[in-house]
Image (spheres, rainbow, N blue to C red):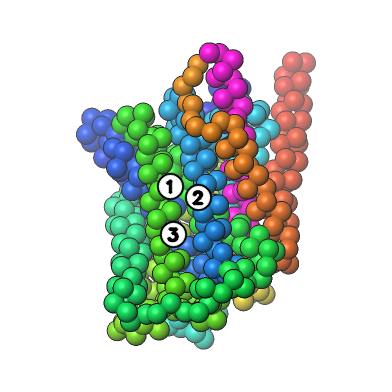
Amino acid sequence: MKEGKQPLSVQKPQVFHQKKIAEQKQKKGMSEGQLVFIGVASILGAGFFLTTATTIRETGISILLSYLVGVFAVWAIFDSLGAMIVTESGSQGSFIYYVEKYLGTLFGFIGGWIYWAAGVLAMSSEITGISIFTQKWLPSVPIWMLSTIYTLLALGINLIGMNNYGRIESFFAVVKTAALVIFIGVVFYFILGGRVAAHAHFTRTDQWFAHGLPGFLTSLSMMFFTFGGIVATGMASAEVENPRVIPSAFRKIVLLLAVLYLLSLFAILYAIPLTKIVENQSPMITILTLLRIPFADAVLNLIMILAAFSTAIAAMFGVSHILVSLSKREEAPSLLAKINKRGVPFPSLIVTTIFVFLFIVASYFLPGSIYEILTTSAGVVYLFLWGMILYTYLRFRRFQQESANEQGKVWGIPWRFWLAILILTIALVGSVFDYKHLMSMLISVGFVLIAGFSYFILIRRKGTRAAEKLR
Protein backbone atom coordinates (compact mmCIF):
# COMPACT_ATOMS: atom_id res chain seq x y z
CA MET A 1 0.00 0.00 0.00
CA LYS A 2 1.31 3.46 -0.88
CA GLU A 3 2.88 5.40 1.89
CA GLY A 4 0.64 8.13 3.27
CA LYS A 5 -2.60 6.48 2.16
CA GLN A 6 -5.14 5.94 4.89
CA PRO A 7 -7.37 2.86 4.99
CA LEU A 8 -10.94 3.43 3.88
CA SER A 9 -13.05 3.70 7.02
CA VAL A 10 -16.78 4.29 7.43
CA GLN A 11 -18.73 4.40 10.65
CA LYS A 12 -22.47 3.80 10.83
CA PRO A 13 -24.40 5.96 13.32
CA GLN A 14 -24.63 3.27 15.98
CA VAL A 15 -20.86 2.81 15.71
CA PHE A 16 -20.38 6.56 16.03
CA HIS A 17 -22.53 6.51 19.17
CA GLN A 18 -20.49 3.69 20.64
CA LYS A 19 -17.34 5.67 19.92
CA LYS A 20 -18.66 8.64 21.87
CA ILE A 21 -19.47 6.39 24.80
CA ALA A 22 -15.96 4.97 24.59
CA GLU A 23 -14.44 8.45 24.73
CA GLN A 24 -16.54 9.32 27.75
CA LYS A 25 -15.34 6.19 29.53
CA GLN A 26 -11.67 7.00 29.03
CA LYS A 27 -11.34 5.06 25.79
CA LYS A 28 -13.04 1.95 27.07
CA GLY A 29 -14.40 0.34 23.89
CA MET A 30 -17.20 -2.03 23.02
CA SER A 31 -17.55 -5.43 24.58
CA GLU A 32 -18.02 -8.64 22.63
CA GLY A 33 -21.74 -8.61 23.41
CA GLN A 34 -22.14 -5.07 22.08
CA LEU A 35 -20.39 -6.00 18.85
CA VAL A 36 -22.68 -9.02 18.43
CA PHE A 37 -25.73 -6.80 18.96
CA ILE A 38 -24.54 -4.15 16.49
CA GLY A 39 -23.63 -6.82 13.93
CA VAL A 40 -27.03 -8.50 14.03
CA ALA A 41 -28.78 -5.12 13.94
CA SER A 42 -26.70 -3.92 10.96
CA ILE A 43 -27.35 -7.04 8.90
CA LEU A 44 -31.02 -7.64 9.79
CA GLY A 45 -32.72 -5.04 7.60
CA ALA A 46 -35.88 -4.54 5.59
CA GLY A 47 -34.44 -6.83 2.92
CA PHE A 48 -35.17 -9.98 4.88
CA PHE A 49 -38.69 -8.85 5.79
CA LEU A 50 -39.60 -8.28 2.13
CA THR A 51 -37.29 -10.26 -0.18
CA THR A 52 -38.35 -13.57 1.34
CA ALA A 53 -41.66 -13.32 -0.55
CA THR A 54 -39.87 -13.20 -3.90
CA THR A 55 -37.27 -15.82 -3.03
CA ILE A 56 -39.91 -18.26 -1.73
CA ARG A 57 -41.99 -17.89 -4.89
CA GLU A 58 -38.94 -18.40 -7.12
CA THR A 59 -37.32 -21.15 -5.07
CA GLY A 60 -40.01 -22.93 -3.09
CA ILE A 61 -39.25 -24.66 0.18
CA SER A 62 -35.65 -25.15 -0.94
CA ILE A 63 -35.06 -21.59 0.23
CA LEU A 64 -34.14 -23.32 3.49
CA LEU A 65 -31.30 -25.07 1.66
CA SER A 66 -30.37 -21.77 0.02
CA TYR A 67 -29.93 -20.13 3.42
CA LEU A 68 -27.94 -23.08 4.76
CA VAL A 69 -25.55 -22.74 1.81
CA GLY A 70 -25.47 -18.97 2.30
CA VAL A 71 -24.67 -19.26 6.00
CA PHE A 72 -21.71 -21.52 5.15
CA ALA A 73 -20.28 -18.86 2.82
CA VAL A 74 -21.05 -15.99 5.20
CA TRP A 75 -19.31 -17.86 8.02
CA ALA A 76 -16.15 -18.10 5.88
CA ILE A 77 -16.38 -14.37 5.04
CA PHE A 78 -16.71 -13.42 8.71
CA ASP A 79 -13.85 -15.74 9.63
CA SER A 80 -11.70 -14.08 6.97
CA LEU A 81 -12.42 -10.59 8.25
CA GLY A 82 -12.05 -11.56 11.90
CA ALA A 83 -8.71 -13.30 11.36
CA MET A 84 -7.23 -10.39 9.43
CA ILE A 85 -8.51 -7.73 11.83
CA VAL A 86 -7.21 -9.50 14.95
CA THR A 87 -3.82 -10.14 13.33
CA GLU A 88 -3.08 -6.71 11.82
CA SER A 89 -4.04 -3.59 13.73
CA GLY A 90 -4.39 -0.20 12.09
CA SER A 91 -7.00 -1.24 9.53
CA GLN A 92 -9.92 0.30 11.50
CA GLY A 93 -11.92 -2.76 10.48
CA SER A 94 -11.83 -1.75 6.81
CA PHE A 95 -11.56 -4.61 4.33
CA ILE A 96 -10.09 -2.15 1.79
CA TYR A 97 -6.91 -1.97 3.89
CA TYR A 98 -6.30 -5.68 3.37
CA VAL A 99 -7.46 -5.73 -0.25
CA GLU A 100 -5.06 -2.94 -1.15
CA LYS A 101 -2.17 -4.49 0.79
CA TYR A 102 -2.48 -8.05 -0.53
CA LEU A 103 -4.12 -7.60 -3.93
CA GLY A 104 -2.90 -4.15 -4.98
CA THR A 105 -4.16 -0.58 -5.35
CA LEU A 106 -6.33 -1.43 -8.38
CA PHE A 107 -8.46 -3.82 -6.35
CA GLY A 108 -8.48 -1.42 -3.41
CA PHE A 109 -9.81 1.36 -5.65
CA ILE A 110 -12.44 -0.88 -7.25
CA GLY A 111 -13.42 -2.27 -3.84
CA GLY A 112 -13.98 1.19 -2.38
CA TRP A 113 -16.10 2.41 -5.28
CA ILE A 114 -18.24 -0.70 -5.67
CA TYR A 115 -18.79 -0.65 -1.90
CA TRP A 116 -20.19 2.85 -2.39
CA ALA A 117 -22.30 1.56 -5.30
CA ALA A 118 -23.58 -1.33 -3.17
CA GLY A 119 -24.45 1.16 -0.43
CA VAL A 120 -26.44 3.35 -2.83
CA LEU A 121 -28.26 0.33 -4.24
CA ALA A 122 -28.98 -1.02 -0.75
CA MET A 123 -30.25 2.37 0.43
CA SER A 124 -32.46 2.69 -2.67
CA SER A 125 -33.75 -0.81 -1.96
CA GLU A 126 -34.52 0.10 1.66
CA ILE A 127 -36.38 3.25 0.56
CA THR A 128 -38.35 1.26 -2.02
CA GLY A 129 -39.12 -1.40 0.60
CA ILE A 130 -40.43 1.25 2.99
CA SER A 131 -42.63 2.61 0.20
CA ILE A 132 -44.04 -0.85 -0.47
CA PHE A 133 -44.79 -1.28 3.25
CA THR A 134 -46.52 2.12 3.26
CA GLN A 135 -48.66 1.19 0.25
CA LYS A 136 -50.48 -1.27 2.51
CA TRP A 137 -52.20 1.80 3.99
CA LEU A 138 -51.92 4.16 1.00
CA PRO A 139 -52.44 1.89 -2.03
CA SER A 140 -53.27 4.76 -4.39
CA VAL A 141 -49.97 6.60 -3.82
CA PRO A 142 -47.31 5.47 -6.34
CA ILE A 143 -43.99 4.03 -5.16
CA TRP A 144 -41.92 6.79 -6.77
CA MET A 145 -43.78 9.48 -4.82
CA LEU A 146 -43.44 7.69 -1.49
CA SER A 147 -39.77 6.99 -2.23
CA THR A 148 -39.18 10.68 -2.97
CA ILE A 149 -40.75 11.70 0.34
CA TYR A 150 -38.74 9.19 2.37
CA THR A 151 -35.50 10.10 0.59
CA LEU A 152 -36.00 13.81 1.30
CA LEU A 153 -36.77 13.02 4.95
CA ALA A 154 -33.62 10.90 5.24
CA LEU A 155 -31.57 13.67 3.63
CA GLY A 156 -33.05 16.27 5.99
CA ILE A 157 -32.19 14.22 9.08
CA ASN A 158 -28.64 13.69 7.82
CA LEU A 159 -28.23 17.41 7.10
CA ILE A 160 -29.24 18.29 10.67
CA GLY A 161 -26.40 16.15 11.98
CA MET A 162 -26.00 12.68 13.46
CA ASN A 163 -24.75 13.48 16.96
CA ASN A 164 -27.76 11.98 18.73
CA TYR A 165 -28.85 9.55 16.06
CA GLY A 166 -26.88 6.65 17.50
CA ARG A 167 -29.40 6.33 20.35
CA ILE A 168 -32.32 6.25 17.92
CA GLU A 169 -30.55 3.72 15.69
CA SER A 170 -29.83 1.46 18.67
CA PHE A 171 -33.45 1.69 19.80
CA PHE A 172 -34.80 0.63 16.42
CA ALA A 173 -32.20 -2.13 16.24
CA VAL A 174 -33.77 -3.59 19.39
CA VAL A 175 -37.29 -3.11 17.99
CA LYS A 176 -36.37 -4.74 14.67
CA THR A 177 -34.78 -7.80 16.25
CA ALA A 178 -37.51 -8.13 18.88
CA ALA A 179 -40.21 -7.99 16.19
CA LEU A 180 -38.68 -10.98 14.42
CA VAL A 181 -38.28 -12.93 17.66
CA ILE A 182 -41.90 -12.23 18.65
CA PHE A 183 -43.10 -13.23 15.18
CA ILE A 184 -41.31 -16.59 15.49
CA GLY A 185 -42.75 -17.10 18.98
CA VAL A 186 -46.33 -16.28 17.93
CA VAL A 187 -46.33 -18.55 14.87
CA PHE A 188 -44.79 -21.46 16.76
CA TYR A 189 -47.35 -20.93 19.53
CA PHE A 190 -50.11 -21.45 16.97
CA ILE A 191 -48.30 -24.42 15.43
CA LEU A 192 -47.64 -26.20 18.74
CA GLY A 193 -51.16 -25.38 19.91
CA GLY A 194 -52.61 -27.22 16.94
CA ARG A 195 -54.26 -24.11 15.45
CA VAL A 196 -52.00 -24.32 12.40
CA ALA A 197 -51.57 -27.64 10.59
CA ALA A 198 -48.77 -28.46 8.19
CA HIS A 199 -49.94 -27.88 4.63
CA ALA A 200 -49.55 -30.69 2.14
CA HIS A 201 -47.07 -28.67 0.08
CA PHE A 202 -44.45 -29.07 2.79
CA THR A 203 -44.11 -32.78 2.05
CA ARG A 204 -44.43 -32.55 -1.75
CA THR A 205 -41.09 -32.86 -3.53
CA ASP A 206 -42.23 -30.69 -6.47
CA GLN A 207 -42.79 -27.76 -4.08
CA TRP A 208 -39.23 -27.87 -2.79
CA PHE A 209 -37.95 -26.61 -6.13
CA ALA A 210 -40.93 -24.62 -7.40
CA HIS A 211 -39.16 -23.51 -10.60
CA GLY A 212 -36.48 -26.16 -10.82
CA LEU A 213 -32.76 -25.61 -10.48
CA PRO A 214 -32.78 -22.26 -12.38
CA GLY A 215 -35.27 -20.84 -9.87
CA PHE A 216 -33.09 -21.98 -6.99
CA LEU A 217 -29.98 -20.40 -8.53
CA THR A 218 -31.64 -17.07 -9.37
CA SER A 219 -32.74 -16.65 -5.76
CA LEU A 220 -29.22 -16.98 -4.34
CA SER A 221 -28.15 -13.38 -5.00
CA MET A 222 -31.32 -12.06 -3.32
CA MET A 223 -30.70 -14.37 -0.38
CA PHE A 224 -27.14 -13.04 -0.01
CA PHE A 225 -28.53 -9.48 0.02
CA THR A 226 -30.03 -10.18 3.45
CA PHE A 227 -26.46 -10.49 4.79
CA GLY A 228 -25.45 -7.13 3.31
CA GLY A 229 -24.15 -5.54 6.53
CA ILE A 230 -21.06 -7.76 6.85
CA VAL A 231 -18.57 -5.07 5.84
CA ALA A 232 -20.19 -2.48 8.13
CA THR A 233 -19.91 -4.97 10.99
CA GLY A 234 -16.20 -5.36 10.25
CA MET A 235 -15.80 -1.59 10.54
CA ALA A 236 -17.74 -1.56 13.80
CA SER A 237 -15.19 -3.99 15.23
CA ALA A 238 -12.64 -1.14 15.25
CA GLU A 239 -14.29 0.08 18.47
CA VAL A 240 -13.90 -3.20 20.38
CA GLU A 241 -11.91 -2.90 23.61
CA ASN A 242 -10.23 -6.30 23.28
CA PRO A 243 -9.62 -7.20 19.59
CA ARG A 244 -9.08 -10.87 20.49
CA VAL A 245 -12.84 -11.32 20.98
CA ILE A 246 -13.65 -10.22 17.41
CA PRO A 247 -13.50 -13.70 15.77
CA SER A 248 -15.69 -15.13 18.53
CA ALA A 249 -18.18 -12.26 18.19
CA PHE A 250 -18.35 -12.75 14.42
CA ARG A 251 -19.11 -16.47 14.85
CA LYS A 252 -21.92 -15.62 17.29
CA ILE A 253 -23.37 -13.12 14.79
CA VAL A 254 -23.48 -15.82 12.09
CA LEU A 255 -25.10 -18.30 14.50
CA LEU A 256 -27.77 -15.83 15.66
CA LEU A 257 -28.63 -14.78 12.12
CA ALA A 258 -28.83 -18.40 11.00
CA VAL A 259 -31.24 -19.22 13.83
CA LEU A 260 -33.42 -16.13 13.25
CA TYR A 261 -33.57 -16.54 9.48
CA LEU A 262 -34.13 -20.29 9.37
CA LEU A 263 -36.73 -20.38 12.15
CA SER A 264 -38.66 -17.51 10.52
CA LEU A 265 -38.63 -19.21 7.13
CA PHE A 266 -39.60 -22.59 8.57
CA ALA A 267 -42.54 -21.00 10.42
CA ILE A 268 -43.76 -19.30 7.23
CA LEU A 269 -43.37 -22.35 5.01
CA TYR A 270 -44.97 -24.68 7.56
CA ALA A 271 -47.98 -22.49 8.28
CA ILE A 272 -49.11 -21.27 4.84
CA PRO A 273 -49.07 -22.71 1.30
CA LEU A 274 -46.80 -21.16 -1.32
CA THR A 275 -49.80 -19.86 -3.28
CA LYS A 276 -50.74 -17.59 -0.36
CA ILE A 277 -47.42 -15.75 -0.45
CA VAL A 278 -47.85 -12.49 -2.34
CA GLU A 279 -44.99 -10.82 -4.17
CA ASN A 280 -44.10 -7.32 -2.88
CA GLN A 281 -45.70 -8.06 0.48
CA SER A 282 -43.87 -9.38 3.51
CA PRO A 283 -44.84 -13.04 4.09
CA MET A 284 -44.82 -12.21 7.80
CA ILE A 285 -47.65 -9.73 7.23
CA THR A 286 -49.45 -12.36 5.15
CA ILE A 287 -49.25 -15.06 7.81
CA LEU A 288 -50.33 -12.74 10.65
CA THR A 289 -53.32 -11.66 8.56
CA LEU A 290 -54.31 -15.28 7.92
CA LEU A 291 -53.96 -16.09 11.62
CA ARG A 292 -56.41 -13.25 12.35
CA ILE A 293 -54.46 -11.83 15.25
CA PRO A 294 -56.06 -8.41 15.95
CA PHE A 295 -53.89 -5.52 14.68
CA ALA A 296 -50.77 -7.74 14.64
CA ASP A 297 -50.16 -7.25 10.91
CA ALA A 298 -50.59 -3.47 11.20
CA VAL A 299 -48.24 -3.26 14.19
CA LEU A 300 -45.59 -5.34 12.42
CA ASN A 301 -45.97 -3.24 9.26
CA LEU A 302 -45.40 -0.06 11.28
CA ILE A 303 -42.36 -1.56 13.00
CA MET A 304 -40.89 -2.57 9.64
CA ILE A 305 -41.43 0.94 8.23
CA LEU A 306 -39.76 2.63 11.20
CA ALA A 307 -36.92 0.13 11.42
CA ALA A 308 -36.26 0.21 7.67
CA PHE A 309 -36.31 4.02 7.67
CA SER A 310 -33.72 4.10 10.43
CA THR A 311 -31.58 1.71 8.37
CA ALA A 312 -31.98 3.95 5.31
CA ILE A 313 -30.82 7.00 7.27
CA ALA A 314 -27.84 5.07 8.58
CA ALA A 315 -27.05 3.85 5.05
CA MET A 316 -27.11 7.42 3.72
CA PHE A 317 -24.77 8.46 6.54
CA GLY A 318 -22.35 5.62 5.83
CA VAL A 319 -22.43 5.87 2.03
CA SER A 320 -21.76 9.61 2.07
CA HIS A 321 -18.75 9.08 4.34
CA ILE A 322 -17.40 6.49 1.92
CA LEU A 323 -17.13 9.30 -0.63
CA VAL A 324 -15.35 11.46 1.95
CA SER A 325 -12.81 8.70 2.57
CA LEU A 326 -12.30 8.11 -1.15
CA SER A 327 -11.78 11.83 -1.66
CA LYS A 328 -9.19 12.02 1.11
CA ARG A 329 -7.35 9.18 -0.60
CA GLU A 330 -7.36 11.21 -3.82
CA GLU A 331 -9.60 8.61 -5.43
CA ALA A 332 -12.61 10.93 -5.75
CA PRO A 333 -13.04 14.68 -6.44
CA SER A 334 -11.55 16.80 -3.64
CA LEU A 335 -14.86 18.65 -3.20
CA LEU A 336 -16.42 15.50 -1.72
CA ALA A 337 -14.06 15.58 1.28
CA LYS A 338 -15.62 18.77 2.69
CA ILE A 339 -17.40 18.47 6.04
CA ASN A 340 -19.25 21.41 7.64
CA LYS A 341 -19.19 22.55 11.28
CA ARG A 342 -21.92 20.08 12.27
CA GLY A 343 -19.84 17.21 10.89
CA VAL A 344 -22.09 16.81 7.86
CA PRO A 345 -20.43 15.89 4.53
CA PHE A 346 -22.78 18.12 2.52
CA PRO A 347 -21.33 17.59 -1.01
CA SER A 348 -21.12 13.80 -0.55
CA LEU A 349 -24.69 13.69 0.77
CA ILE A 350 -25.99 15.59 -2.23
CA VAL A 351 -24.13 13.37 -4.72
CA THR A 352 -25.40 10.23 -2.98
CA THR A 353 -28.97 11.56 -2.92
CA ILE A 354 -28.83 12.37 -6.64
CA PHE A 355 -27.99 8.74 -7.41
CA VAL A 356 -30.80 7.53 -5.14
CA PHE A 357 -33.19 9.78 -7.06
CA LEU A 358 -32.02 8.18 -10.32
CA PHE A 359 -33.28 4.85 -9.02
CA ILE A 360 -36.52 6.52 -7.89
CA VAL A 361 -37.00 7.66 -11.48
CA ALA A 362 -36.53 4.03 -12.51
CA SER A 363 -39.32 3.05 -10.09
CA TYR A 364 -41.67 5.32 -12.09
CA PHE A 365 -41.10 3.21 -15.21
CA LEU A 366 -40.76 -0.16 -13.43
CA PRO A 367 -43.10 0.12 -10.40
CA GLY A 368 -43.73 -3.61 -10.14
CA SER A 369 -40.16 -4.88 -10.40
CA ILE A 370 -37.86 -2.06 -9.24
CA TYR A 371 -37.47 -3.48 -5.72
CA GLU A 372 -36.33 -6.86 -6.99
CA ILE A 373 -33.92 -5.25 -9.48
CA LEU A 374 -32.38 -3.00 -6.80
CA THR A 375 -32.11 -5.81 -4.28
CA THR A 376 -30.54 -8.23 -6.73
CA SER A 377 -28.16 -5.55 -8.05
CA ALA A 378 -26.96 -4.80 -4.53
CA GLY A 379 -26.69 -8.53 -3.84
CA VAL A 380 -24.54 -9.09 -6.93
CA VAL A 381 -22.21 -6.21 -5.97
CA TYR A 382 -21.89 -7.74 -2.50
CA LEU A 383 -20.89 -11.03 -4.15
CA PHE A 384 -17.98 -9.25 -5.85
CA LEU A 385 -16.92 -7.63 -2.57
CA TRP A 386 -17.13 -10.81 -0.51
CA GLY A 387 -15.28 -12.82 -3.14
CA MET A 388 -12.57 -10.17 -2.97
CA ILE A 389 -12.42 -10.52 0.84
CA LEU A 390 -12.12 -14.31 0.68
CA TYR A 391 -9.37 -14.23 -1.94
CA THR A 392 -7.57 -11.50 0.01
CA TYR A 393 -7.59 -13.76 3.06
CA LEU A 394 -6.02 -16.60 1.10
CA ARG A 395 -3.24 -14.24 0.00
CA PHE A 396 -2.98 -12.98 3.58
CA ARG A 397 -2.53 -16.55 4.86
CA ARG A 398 0.17 -17.24 2.30
CA PHE A 399 2.06 -14.16 3.48
CA GLN A 400 1.63 -15.22 7.14
CA GLN A 401 3.05 -18.67 6.42
CA GLU A 402 6.02 -17.21 4.55
CA SER A 403 6.79 -14.95 7.50
CA ALA A 404 6.37 -17.88 9.94
CA ASN A 405 3.48 -16.07 11.64
CA GLU A 406 0.62 -18.43 12.50
CA GLN A 407 -1.76 -15.78 13.85
CA GLY A 408 -5.08 -15.36 12.09
CA LYS A 409 -5.43 -19.04 11.29
CA VAL A 410 -8.90 -20.57 11.13
CA TRP A 411 -10.13 -24.06 10.30
CA GLY A 412 -10.66 -25.34 6.79
CA ILE A 413 -7.76 -23.57 5.05
CA PRO A 414 -7.86 -23.42 2.07
CA TRP A 415 -10.70 -25.71 0.98
CA ARG A 416 -13.49 -23.97 2.98
CA PHE A 417 -12.63 -20.59 1.49
CA TRP A 418 -12.34 -21.86 -2.07
CA LEU A 419 -15.71 -23.58 -1.58
CA ALA A 420 -17.20 -20.29 -0.33
CA ILE A 421 -15.80 -18.51 -3.41
CA LEU A 422 -17.38 -21.23 -5.58
CA ILE A 423 -20.76 -20.67 -3.86
CA LEU A 424 -20.52 -16.93 -4.53
CA THR A 425 -19.58 -17.63 -8.16
CA ILE A 426 -22.57 -19.97 -8.59
CA ALA A 427 -24.84 -17.28 -7.13
CA LEU A 428 -23.34 -14.79 -9.57
CA VAL A 429 -23.81 -17.07 -12.58
CA GLY A 430 -27.29 -18.03 -11.38
CA SER A 431 -28.50 -14.47 -11.82
CA VAL A 432 -28.52 -14.87 -15.63
CA PHE A 433 -31.47 -17.30 -15.59
CA ASP A 434 -34.05 -14.55 -15.06
CA TYR A 435 -34.24 -11.36 -17.12
CA LYS A 436 -34.65 -9.07 -14.09
CA HIS A 437 -31.72 -10.74 -12.38
CA LEU A 438 -29.75 -10.56 -15.62
CA MET A 439 -30.40 -6.81 -15.71
CA SER A 440 -29.11 -6.58 -12.14
CA MET A 441 -26.03 -8.59 -13.13
CA LEU A 442 -25.31 -6.19 -16.00
CA ILE A 443 -25.74 -3.16 -13.71
CA SER A 444 -23.33 -4.62 -11.17
CA VAL A 445 -20.73 -5.65 -13.77
CA GLY A 446 -21.08 -2.15 -15.22
CA PHE A 447 -20.15 -0.64 -11.85
CA VAL A 448 -17.05 -2.84 -11.64
CA LEU A 449 -15.93 -1.99 -15.19
CA ILE A 450 -16.49 1.74 -14.67
CA ALA A 451 -14.49 1.62 -11.43
CA GLY A 452 -11.64 -0.23 -13.15
CA PHE A 453 -11.63 2.16 -16.12
CA SER A 454 -11.69 5.17 -13.78
CA TYR A 455 -8.69 3.80 -11.89
CA PHE A 456 -6.52 3.73 -14.99
CA ILE A 457 -7.60 7.26 -15.94
CA LEU A 458 -6.79 8.47 -12.43
CA ILE A 459 -3.39 6.74 -12.39
CA ARG A 460 -2.55 8.19 -15.81
CA ARG A 461 -3.49 11.68 -14.59
CA LYS A 462 -1.38 11.26 -11.46
CA GLY A 463 1.53 10.07 -13.58
CA THR A 464 1.21 13.11 -15.85
CA ARG A 465 1.15 15.48 -12.89
CA ALA A 466 4.18 13.78 -11.35
CA ALA A 467 6.07 14.08 -14.64
CA GLU A 468 5.20 17.78 -14.93
CA LYS A 469 6.56 18.43 -11.43
CA LEU A 470 9.87 16.81 -12.35
CA ARG A 471 10.36 19.07 -15.38
Residue at the spot 73% in from the left edge and 56% down from the top edge? 442
Characterize the local packing of mark 1: few (<14), some (14-19) or many (20 or more) Cα atoms within 10 angstroms. Answer: many
Closer to the chain start, of discs 3 and 1, is 1
Q: Where does the image place residue 139, in percent across and percent down from the top left? A: 49, 84
The answer to if 397 sits in the magenta stretch is: yes
Residue range highlighted in magenta: 376-404
* Closest to the observer, 297 or 451: 297
Residue 71's disc is 2
Residue 261's disc is 3
Give how far apart the Cα atoms at labels 3 and 2 are: 10 Å
Q: Residue type at mark 3?
A: Tyr
* Closest to the observer, 78 or 352: 78
Residue 254's disc is 1
Q: Quadrant of the N terminus?
A: top right
Q: Quadrant of the C terminus?
A: top right
Q: Residue type at mark 1?
A: Val
Q: Residue type at mark 2?
A: Val
* 3 and 2 marks in contact (CB < 8 Å): yes
Residue at the spot 61% in from the left edge and 57% down from the top edge? 221
Instruction: Give the structural element (helix, strand or loop) at label 2.
Output: helix
Instruction: Give the structural element (helix, strand or loop) at label 3.
Output: helix
Q: Where does the image place residue 194, in percent across and percent down from the top left? A: 32, 79
Q: Where does the image place residue 170, in percent across and percent down from the top left? A: 31, 53
